Amino acid sequence: MKAKHYSWNATAAGYLFIAPLLAVMVVFFAYGFYFLVRTGFQSTDISFHTPKYIGWDNYRLLLVDSRFFHSILNTIVFAVVSVIIGLTFGFVASIFLQFKLPGKKLFHSILFLPTIMPMALIATVIAMMLESRFGTLNTFLRFIGLDFLALQWLSDPNLAYGSIMVMSIFLIGLPIMYYVSEFPTLNTSVLEAAVLDGAGLGRMLTLILFPMLRNTHKTVILSILLGSFREFERIFLLTGGGPMNSTEIVSTYVFRQQNGGMEMGIMSAASVIVLLVAFILALLQIRFTTMKK
Amino acid sequence: MDMFLVSKGEKRTIRWVIYGLGLLFLFPIVSAIYNSLKYEGFENYIFVFTHKINGISVLSTFWNSLQIAVGHAFFVLLVGSLAGYAFSKIEFAGKEIVYIGVLMCLAIPLVVMIVPFFYIFQNLGLYNHLLAVVCSEVAMTLPFAVLFFRNFYDSLPKELMESATIDGANVFQAFSKVYLPLARSALINLGVLCVMWSFQDFLAPLMFLTDKDLATTNVAINNLKGAFGLSPGNVGKFNAFLVVLGIPALVLFLVAQKFITQGITSGALKD
């Protein structure tokens, strides 16, 4: 790469344009990172009055904290399940919406609705529905005679995380949006040829369309990874991380350390680890968006 | 038009899958509305507007949420469009390094920034002020906005800049007279997304606003359980509150679905 020559005027103008942005970045992120890194090496409570430097001790404690380890594992499982749901349900629904059906537009909107609504609202409505004694789901199941299926969806430690993850089905609006926006660019003659060769619906989906949408899958995967990594209120409002920490993810772990925990050093150390993962995800996203151009 | 030719049986499968999914998606909504009419019928809705949840009035949460959303959108569009333009059209020293530095903040979850932000707001005297929520949302959205606007301005031809310069315009005039007017649709799309993200934001208002008069709709939702518990007798009122608190997001959905889709699929992605 050859060195570019920058004129003084252009450089001054450039920095003038980005000055407000830089102010926000420095005040909130640069200072925020400094704050977390510094506190990560300290032992201090929420008052921050008498911080004590303790080196890497917080990180050592985190590494042996099974709850933290468990929360990371849960976050990964959560992300993988959400991605799978997006790539299957989202993919199939987006294609099925390309067929002439009465009320198609309405159903398209309905599938998109939960994506726009606040997660806090959806989580609370679902929590009401899944309540074991008088929630709508169990009332309904008992009504049609399936009493044995009326389970403790959110209070049974073995079931709670599954219930929460299945909720991702309600969030296929985003994958659908990405897939649908890609369809106009598809080569229709390939589809016609495949139909002429006798490919049925199942084969069209799995052997023709799924490979054709390879690049869109990447967008979907990345967007769901980002969303899962930032997920908080779904867990917070449905189970609060319980029962018995079975639904704890990294964000609820950090939140609990902030509010219940006395030790801000450990919270900060955990936050620094989360930040490092966030930087990796951002790098993936940067590479992906620049590659697409 | 069908995407490709399918048999009658397959068409039936398609119909069942879409209608089935639709019903599944409607189930929670219908369930909430049905439950909201329990015991006292429509009286529950009158109760929602005449009583407070834990000292929070529903109408004031609408007003607070709206103010935060508008503030969030305004500052993101202002700061983001200026910066995106500079990153796209001005050649200045250190540009790419600063750009990458900003984008590195794309994936940060707000939850890890709560404590640092809390200290910043206390020092700025913004704690317990709607501006605290506006600031934290603006900070969290800006990296995306910069990516969004740079991509947008990159898609506009460079010749525009050249012809503007030949006509005697400097970079500032080229921005305000040529590029900004062309960015109208991008501004609308991102503005609507900002409002949507504001309406979805849960943590910032929960942590930075303890004054009940400043509560947003999502803070009110969080307070519902505490106010009613999940006892059967209160199911009607509880659900009536839920239905009413969903109205702002629903209105946004009905009015601006198109802009949200355009904004999200326009090349840059958030979550």
Image (cartoon, coloured by chain):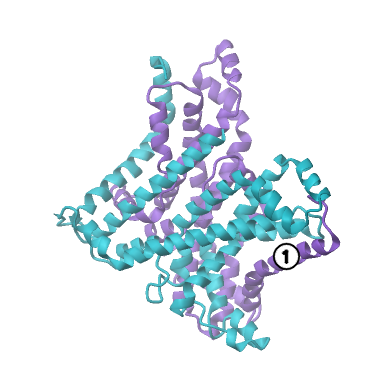
Chain colours: A cyan, B purple
Q: Which residue is mark 1?
A: B17
Q: Determine whether B134 is above or below A151 in the image.
A: above
Question: Which type of secondary structure does the marked residue at label 1 adopt?
Answer: helix
Q: Determine whether B26 is above or below B268 in the image.
A: below
- Relative placement, left or right, of B22 versus A280 is right
Residue farthest to the front, as pictured: A197
Residue in the image at 56% along x and 47% along y: A218
Q: Position of residue A246 (x, y in %)?
A: 41, 72
Identify the image quadrant of residue B161: top right
Identify the image quadrant of residue B238: bottom right
Callout 1, which amino acid? Val
Residue in the image at 58% along x and 16% along y: B164
**Which chain letter matches label 1?**
B
- Relative placement, left or right, of B199 versus A108 is left
Q: Position of residue A50 (x, y in %)?
A: 14, 57
Residue in the image at 41% along x and 22% along y: B92
